Amino acid sequence: MGGQRNLSLAQARRIALAAQGLSKGRKEQAITARKIANAIGAIAQLQIDSVNVVRRAHYMPMFARLGPYDIGILDQLLAKPRSPITEYWAHEASVVSSGLIQDLRVWQRRTWVDRSDGFSAEQLELSDRVLDYLSENPGSSARQISRALDVAPVQEKSHWGWNWNDTKFVTESLFAQAKILALGRNSQFERRYALAADVVGAQVEVDAPHRQEALARLVARAMDALGIATAHCVAEYFRLPLRAAKEELARQAHGGLVEEVAVIGISEPCYLQAGTRIPRKVDHDLRLLSPFDSMVFNRRRLEMFFGFEYRIEIYVPEKLRRYGYYVFPMLYGEEFVGRVDLKADRTKSVLHAKQVHYEPGIDAGIEPELRVELDRLARWLDLGEVKIGL
């Protein structure tokens, strides 16, 4: 195309890392609620996962970007009404900027969660009762609601993970519809439900934005968070339909909001927001990124831009795993240089780096940097010792 810019892969990497808050070295400083909220706002979401091998997944990205911080501050932000962040469906279940709820609700239709189209009369009636109950008792878990409304537990536990009673089906559906949201989670990692108005200060089920307007904003937010992206990268960030994301990117390119560029070594067209600056360098601060970090959860993007093949092997039989059970990619400067299989043994107060694998051609001289990061992580986890190796 005439006039289209060409960028090197190194330039694209620096743009991507800067957008994700991973280009500047972490400093020894107090991490305030505002810094945490701003860092989350920049990347738009923290994916939530129940696996707690090291620490819950949504806590880890802020450590990688800000350094050691008090997770209680993040918990308080999530439990606070009208907070800048809350929980909703994004890439997956995620901590998100509260301002995204309206737009995400229009596009996040996960039928395995919201089963209200097939509800019985009793479940529809229970939905109204749940809303009434939460209007008087915000911050209640599904179990608390079940007890209060005398809803029976599931009788036949035929599935290993999804044995939901009617209250659970109803609350998950109301949450997917953003009629109720969450005021954080309790010590059992259960959502503390409340009416949407009590969480974000607005009736998000009223005055839904037009789908196209919502799409335009979500694409723009994805581009903010990604820095540089293919259409697939943009679609994956908030689980948008690929065709719709492509069409919206074309509209924004035509309007001068984004610029289509070619990145040497990448066959697909890439997009930058207009006026994006290319960082000159990325600080050499070795970081271990959680498997659910927004920098790495799109494995195709990671391989395309960084030449780093990564798969999570939690569900792979042990004898078939290549690198371990809960493996953290190792980022150093603008390269992914290896991976570490981590486990926090809280009983023995030990952080185990069970296996360490470096990428081909990586100098083992970075091992001291890894040790510094493991020690930093162990202190943050209140663990007394680091052990490397099985």
Image (cartoon, rainbow, N blue to C red):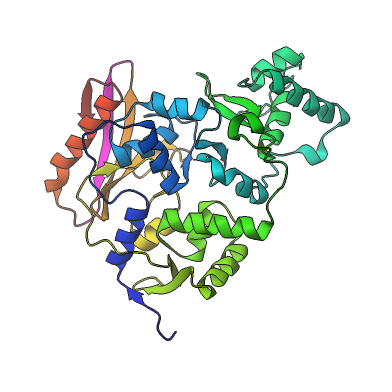
Compared with 131, 67 (above or below) is below
Q: Quadrant of residue 98?
A: top right
Furthest-right residue in this view: 121
Q: Position of residue 137 (x, y in %)?
A: 67, 18
Q: Is residue 268 visible?
A: no
Q: Quadrant of residue 122?
A: top right
Q: Residue at x 40, y 42 (%)?
A: 38
Furthest-bottom residue in this view: 2
The main secondary structure of the magenta stretch is strand
Q: Position of residue 208 (x, y in %)?
A: 70, 48
Please state the extent of the stretch shown in magenta in the rendering: 347-360
Q: Residue at x 22, y 27 (%)?
A: 386
Q: Position of residue 347 (x, y in %)?
A: 33, 15
Compared with 65, 262 (above or below) is below
- Whether residue 45 sits left or right of residue 150 in the image: it is left
Q: In the rendered picture of this protein, how many numbered marks are placed on residues?
A: 0
Q: Is residue 187 magenta?
A: no
Q: Is residue 354 magenta?
A: yes
User: On the rendered image, what quadrant is the C terminus found in?
Assistant: top left
Q: Which of the pair 314/93 is nearer the observer?
A: 93
